[in-house]
Amino acid sequence: MNDVLDVILRLLIVFVVFLTFPLIIGQTEHKVMAHMQGRLGPMYAGGFHGWAQLIADGVKFAQKEDVVPAGADRRIFQLAPAVALLPYLLVLLAIPIGPDEGAVGQVIDAGVFFVLAVMGVGVLGSLMAGWASANKFSLLGGLRTAAQLLAYELPMLLTAASVAMAAGTVSIPGILDAFEWWWLPWQIVGAIVFFVAGLAELQRPPFDMPVADSEIIFGAYTEYTGLRFALFLLAEYAGIVVLCGLTTVLFLGGWHGPWGADGLGWVWTLLKTAVLAFVVIWLRVTYPRLREDQLQKLAWTLLVPLSLAQIALTGVVKVVIQ
Amino acid sequence: MAPIPGSGLAKGLAVTLRTMTKKSVTAQYPDAQPDLPPRTRGVIGLFEENCTVCMLCARECPDWCIYIDSHKETVPAAAPGGRERSRNVLDRFAIDFSLCMYCGICIEVCPFDALFWSPEFEYAETDIRDLTHERDKLREWMWTVPAPPALDPGAEDPKELATARKTADKLAAQQAPPATEPHADEQARAAERPTRPQGDSKQQTDQPKPDQPTPGQEGRE
């Protein structure tokens, strides 16, 4: 009975985090982006500085008609948002925020492997949406998504592998237990490559070629309306939470911090995640969208060689210090 | 020296970060009224006491958006044995702001200072026909006309002032021995006081000075 309660509680907490954190990041994006552009952002919804803007947006989306185009592959079309969103919920289960047993949804031995595999599934949602919409723009978006997935999954896996090599384990709590502060400079290239590749996989600007609203009118999401469209948006922000959380635990040492080690580890994890989320927004505001060929070029000629170099470096250092 | 690779990217990040820390420029309009400069072209106010129904504004208006109706009234002779005078009485003065293009020609052309720019701009309507505003509304807008901005330091005196001073000086020179020089100065100051154009005291300008043509009349001659 106690076990059941424990599981239910953990699932509930993860679910609540899954529902609230993306909204917090979304709201932060509204405000940060506005101020970076000399604006104020939402000011009305909820009364105080538009804190309830995303709730209002959600209500608006819920009121809209859920349209499925006549030529669409109905079942796939309707399933796609769920496929895009749910993997991030599963990944969230495996990210530890503190050193204790209670600070992680579920300890998975092959954590890194699980996390990256499941994150890859999320992109499938966009592919399904692009194909099932029976719309040329959607199809283009889907194709670009596929190309982007192929290009950026590789450096992401390689850099994650580099960390796993350094720690000698693929369990995420295991990696964090083995973490030392000097891993930071040692794995810095890997961290940057992982983060950039993750951004590209989330299709966040400046890597938002597959959605490119000014070009292929939101790509795979062209035909979506109402709640299903909102789910895609939610998936993007949940993706930011997951990417920042993963970068934090894999490269930035998660709950390790210069002080406050006991009991406050989770604060460090959340803090680092929040800072990374800010960087995600910052990059979005600052840089224009890459062209499709530039996107591919960046992945194959820069990120992949860099991640390979990182693996070589990790291997050499690992052998030397043993 | 070649720029360091990525320095442009860093510069971009610095720009956005710096902008974020600065105060944003958004004006929260319905909550905070905008701070409009003097001579803002918001709406045209009618100071109908000054209007003599000369119809110049209506005739000069490029899109004919000013409607004026009037009739003549006979004013009995002021002094016994005098002649009766006829006077124009304004019946209707309306401006159709759906046609008005805010060129301001009517205001420029009015020889009696009956039309003014007001910075008031919140007069949107849901029906285009409601944009034709009658004289009562135009008169109400007169209350929102601000005092004209002060002259630049060192600027020439306004024409009215200069003329008044010249007259006063001449008067003083005529009637007084050199001992009463300061008196003349005082007179000049007294002359300039009522002509200071502010708020509602525009009345004194409705006596056109025959020897001093207003710019509008000049333009037509």
Image: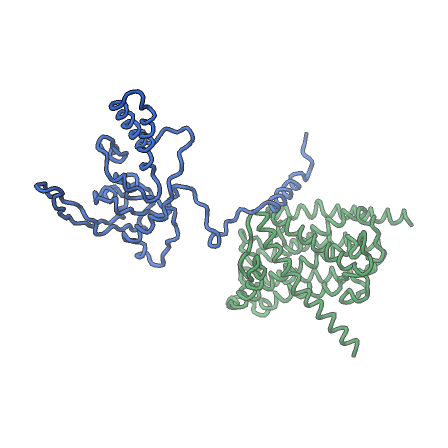
Identify the hue of chain A: green
Is residue A44 in view from this perspective? yes
Q: In the figure, is residue B51 to the left or right of A222?
A: left
User: Of B42 and B77, which appears nearest the observer?
Assistant: B77
- Quick check: A285 above or below A7? above
Instruction: Give residue A177's quadrant in the image.
Output: bottom right
Coordinates of residue B121 in the picture (x, y in percent):
39, 50
Q: In the figure, is residue B133 to the left or right of B26?
A: left
Coordinates of residue B163 in the picture (x, y in percent):
29, 29
Instruction: Give residue A242's quadrant in the image.
Output: bottom right
Coordinates of residue A101 in the picture (x, y in percent):
81, 66
Q: How many marks?
A: 0
Is residue A175 in view from this perspective? no
Chain that the image shows in blue = B
Point out the residue furthest to the front here. B179
- Quick check: A14 above or below B142? below
User: Of A44 and A15, which appears nearest the observer?
Assistant: A44
- Residue at 73% across / 58% down in the picture? A270
Image quadrant holding the N terminus of chain B, namely: top right
Image quadrant holding the C terminus of chain B, namely: top left
Point out the residue furthest to the bottom here. A1
**Rendered image coloring scheme:** by chain
